[in-house]
């Protein structure tokens, strides 16, 4: 017996991937900004917020936000090749929109970003099985805030920052895992604040400054 061909909806993560509090909160924040700008009325705000609270999939949020933003929530869950820009709608650069973050995954192999890598303002870490290290010691950036979302997994995430940077972990849930930060929570001067949210799941999170091995590697 041949298996049935999956329907287009079954192959579209924007119609099958369940959203959570984070996606709903982001949509509500956008609605409130729109109301504050006078683009929607208070009544429309209340009506749309109810729809957001009952939304189950990214595509449900699209219906609420389509006339308020060019970056739809479903774009975050679809492969870049599957997103066709509508007329007048430019493709976003990955990591420069909160609905389209730079995604770093660690399945069976660990993932490391270090040296002078291009750091976008929005990053999502998915340490499902292995570990992720985000090393910012040699990064040059004008960003004031770097948002990192961690998707719960069994691996660990380590953030390494220069002495004048800072990491805030107030929005990071540890669930069964552990969260440890031995760095400042407020940056020096105009240096970036790395704001970490999401959940570490059963893994661990650590924020630290450079250690002996980092300094030795940079000196080479």
Image (cartoon, helix red, strand yellow):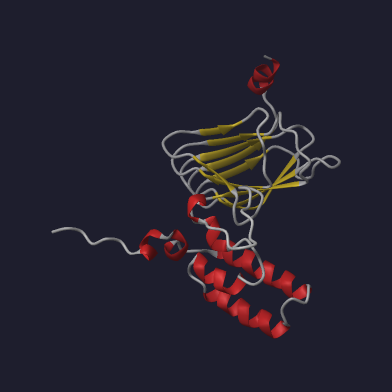
Toward the top, the furthest residue is 220
Q: Nearer the viewer, residue 13 or 144?
A: 13
Position of residue 218 measured from the top left corner of the image (x, y, whole percent): 68, 20
Which part of the image, by quadrant, shows the C terminus? Answer: top right
How many numbered marks, from 0 up? 0
Position of residue 87 measured from the top left corner of the image (x, y, whole percent): 61, 63
Position of residue 37 measured from the top left corner of the image (x, y, whole percent): 78, 72
> Is the residue 4 above or below the residue 40 in the image?
above
To which quarter of the image does residue 61 belong? bottom right
To which quarter of the image does residue 188 belong? top right
Q: Nearer the viewer, residue 191 or 169?
A: 191
The residue sitting at 69% across, 27% down in the picture is 210
The residue sitting at 69% across, 85% down in the picture is 43
To which quarter of the image does residue 32 belong? bottom right
> Is the residue 67 above or below the residue 139 in the image?
below
Which part of the image, by quadrant, shows the N terminus? Answer: bottom left
The residue sitting at 51% across, 36% down in the picture is 131
Toward the left, the furthest residue is 1
Toward the bottom, the furthest residue is 43
The residue sitting at 68% across, 29% down in the picture is 116
Position of residue 173 measured from the top left corner of the image (x, y, whole percent): 58, 53
Toward the right, the furthest residue is 189
Is 116 left or right of 110, judged from the image as shown? right
> Is the residue 74 above or below the residue 214 in the image?
below
């Amino acid at each position: 017996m041949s298996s049935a061909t999956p329907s287009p909806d079954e192959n579209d993560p924007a119609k099958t991937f369940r959203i959570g509090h984070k996606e709903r909160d982001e949509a509500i924040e956008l609605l409130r900004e729109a109301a504050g700008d006078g683009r929607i009325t208070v009544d429309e705000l209340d009506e749309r917020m109810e729809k957001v609270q009952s939304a189950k999939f990214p595509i449900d949020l699209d219906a609420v936000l389509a006339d308020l933003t060019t970056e739809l929530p479903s774009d975050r869950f679809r492969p870049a090749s599957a997103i066709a820009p509508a007329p007048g709608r430019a493709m976003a650069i990955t990591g420069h929109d909160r609905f389209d973050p730079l995604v770093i995954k660690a399945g069976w192999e660990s993932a490391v970003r270090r040296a002078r890598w291009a750091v976008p303002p929005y990053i999502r870490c998915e340490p499902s099985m292995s570990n992720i290290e985000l090393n910012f010691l040699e990064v040059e950036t004008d960003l004031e805030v770097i948002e990192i979302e961690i998707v719960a997994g069994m691996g660990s995430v380590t953030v390494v920052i220069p002495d004048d940077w800072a990491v805030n972990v107030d929005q990071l849930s540890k669930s069964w895992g552990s969260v440890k930060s031995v760095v400042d929570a407020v940056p020096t001067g105009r240096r970036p604040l790395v704001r970490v949210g999401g959940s570490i799941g059963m893994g661990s999170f650590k924020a630290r400054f450079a250690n002996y091995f980092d300094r030795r590697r940079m000196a080479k």
